[in-house]
Every structure is written in structure tokens, then in C-alpha cells.
Amino acid sequence: MKKTVFTFVLTVLLFTGMTHAKITNKAFLMEIFTGCMGDGADYDALVGMMGIGGTFEYCGCATNEMSINMNIKDVMKVGIDVMAEYDESDEPGTANDRQLAVALRNKNLSNAIVECMSKVIK
């Protein structure tokens, strides 16, 4: 799950020219979804919790929630704050606890995670 959050935040940095409140750029949304479905320990943990189909459902839901509720400027700010918490001693491909804590302080991002997890995990 930490990788998912971290990937969402970092993906936004690729699209710095977008400043509208709703995200409608297909390439951007696909990057968010693909990042959520990426390989690594955090992805494996998602699959372990909800299965591969549930992981597809969660990642699609989270991508949709972000597209509706996230402001690009705010997400970029979260991304910068998360990157500031990077430590070279951290395990590659995962977000450390400090990075996750910074990302989850964003109300819209944490709401998307809760909303989508609660739909998939019953």
C-alpha cells in the first residue's frame, strides 16, 4: 500500500503543467493506475489482502477518486513533501513510514484510500 500512495504522488510530478481541479488527462490517469499495479513488496501486500481482481478494483477506484477530488497543485505539494522524506537506506521500491505519513496527511488522498479499501475489503 505504501508504494501505491508513493507512486500516485510521484506520478503527478510528471505532469506539472496541469492545474485544473479535475484530472481528465488519460495518460496521467493511466500512469496513476499503472503505478498502483506496479511490482514490488507493497503491490504484493495488496494482492495478499484482496487478490489480483480486488487489486485491479482498488487501483481503478483510487485512480477515479483522485481524478475527481484531487487538485494537481496540492498533489504536487504532497509529492515534494514525500520526496523530502526519502532516505537512501530505505528498501528500494517501497515508501518509508515517514513518506507514507506525509502522504496520508492530505485529506483527499487519505479519503480516496479509505473509500476504495472499504469497497474492496468486506
Image: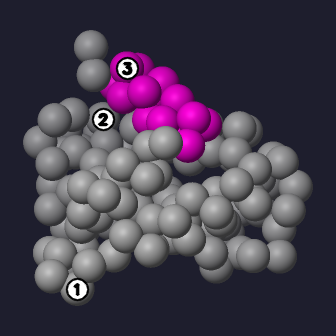
Count the marks.
3
Which residues fall within the magenta stretch?
Answer: 106-120
Residue 111: mark: none
Q: Is residue 33 left or right of residue 45?
A: right
Q: Is residue 1 left or right of residue 5?
A: left
**Looking at the picture, does residue 85 appear above or below residue 103?**
below
For mark 3, does the 10 Å Cα neighbourhood hold few (<14), some (14 to 19), or many (20 or more) residues?
Answer: few
Q: Position of residue 122 (x, y in %)?
A: 27, 14
What type is the residue that disc 2 sits on? Gly
Kindly report the distance in space between the C-alpha atoms of the residues bearing marks 3 and 2: 11 Å
Q: Nearer the viewer, residue 51 or 28?
A: 28
Measured along the vertical axis of the image, is residue 122 above or below residue 6?
Answer: above
Measured along the vertical axis of the image, is residue 62 above or below residue 13?
A: above
Please report the residue visible at 83 percent of the width from the left and 48 percent of the height from the top: 21
Q: Which amino acid type is marked by label 1?
A: Glu
Mark 1 vs mark 3: give the one in front: 1
Q: Residues within 10 Å of mark 1 (few under 14, many from 20)?
A: few
Which one is in front in this view, the residue at disc 3 or the one at disc 2?
3
Q: Which residue is mark 2?
A: 54
Instruction: Say the numbered circle drawn on residue 118.
Output: 3
Residue 83, position as x, y percentages in the image: 45, 74
